[in-house]
Amino acid sequence: MGRMSLRVLGGPAAQGELAQAVESFFARCAARGLAEGTVTFYRQRLSRFTDFLSQAGITSLGGATAAVVRDFLAAERERVSAAAAAKARTTLCAFFSYLEREGLVSENPMPKVERVKAPQKLVRPLTEEEVERLLALCNNRTFLGCRLRALLLVMLDCGLRASEVCGLDLEDVDLSAATLRVRHAKGGKERELPFGQATREALVSYLARRGELAAQALFVTHYGDRLDRGDVRRILVTAGKRAGVTGVHPHRLRHSAATFFLRGGGNIFALQRMLGHSSLAMVRRYAEVTQSDLVEQHRACSPGDRFMSAVKATQGRKRLR
């Protein structure tokens, strides 16, 4: 994973004790085998924090007090957004918790730093009509068409992250059992997910077009190279433009998969296992979208309307009793 250079951490004032503490933190991240995306997330935000300390002339860990952290988060909120400030706080909580466990700081300032309130923006899921327009692009007589259909259906049927899709190997697909073995993008855990008949047929068609390439990756380029997250995003964005569907990207497909699952009668506990979340907190965010369906569903399935025959209209004027 490599050690973070002092140059990346900030100016000359960031060198010394603070820089050593940050390098020690990333060495610990490497030992724990944290996902590359998580480490990149930490690197970017710690870089901003050390730059902020450098500009303030703070070179020691003791100088990073709760007041200083609050000033940094306020600056992040103003410079970028409340969401960016909230993410920075998450990083600093992990950083200072590590320093506290290792005895590198006498006091962890983060318990005194209030949570940053940031609006939770829910991604609008794709509609069924939009999905149908995307699938209509797929030409089963070409490699690219078969790959796009299989990619769309695997992501919609199983709710995978882009990194999880890219990590799939041929041996992870069991067509007879209609299951996928998925390696969790965060932490390396595995989970086995079922898929439906439509996805199975799409995979069969794609694998026939894929041929006997030496690569072990399931989803590959024309030349047999494994697709990366950038490739997957570009494929989806291009498909969206061709289909006239705006905002098509991996996370939106994952969000749509969760929404379709709940609308189809799936429960949030099964959805939690499907998405690979360690807690229900994120799953509840997906569930909130389905609340928009409540009025329509209630009109169709109103418990009270089952007893309509018991409600009789009064005839003429009657005295209230």
Image: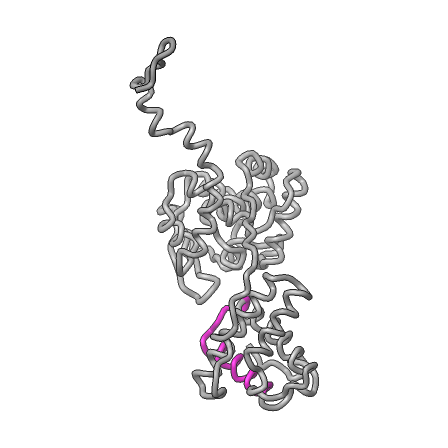
Q: Nearer the viewer, residue 66 or 220?
A: 66
User: Residue visible at 46% across and 78% down?
Assistant: 97
Reply above or below: 5 against 259. Answer: below
Residue 16, position as x, y percentages in the image: 61, 90
238 left or right of 89 in image: right
Region in magenta: 18-37
| Extreme residue in the top direction | 316
Residue depicted at x 51% and y 48%: 255
Write the residue at 48% across / 81% down.
108
- Quadrant (top left/top right/bottom left/bottom right) for the N terminus: bottom right
Q: Quadrant of the C terminus?
A: top left
Secondary structure that dominates the magenta span: helix
In depth, the one of 204 and 149 nearer the eye is 149
Q: Residue at x 51, y 50 (%)?
A: 254
- Can residue 216 be seen? no
Q: Nearer the viewer, residue 146 or 250?
A: 250
Q: Magenta includes 168? A: no
Q: Position of residue 54 (x, y in %)?
A: 67, 83
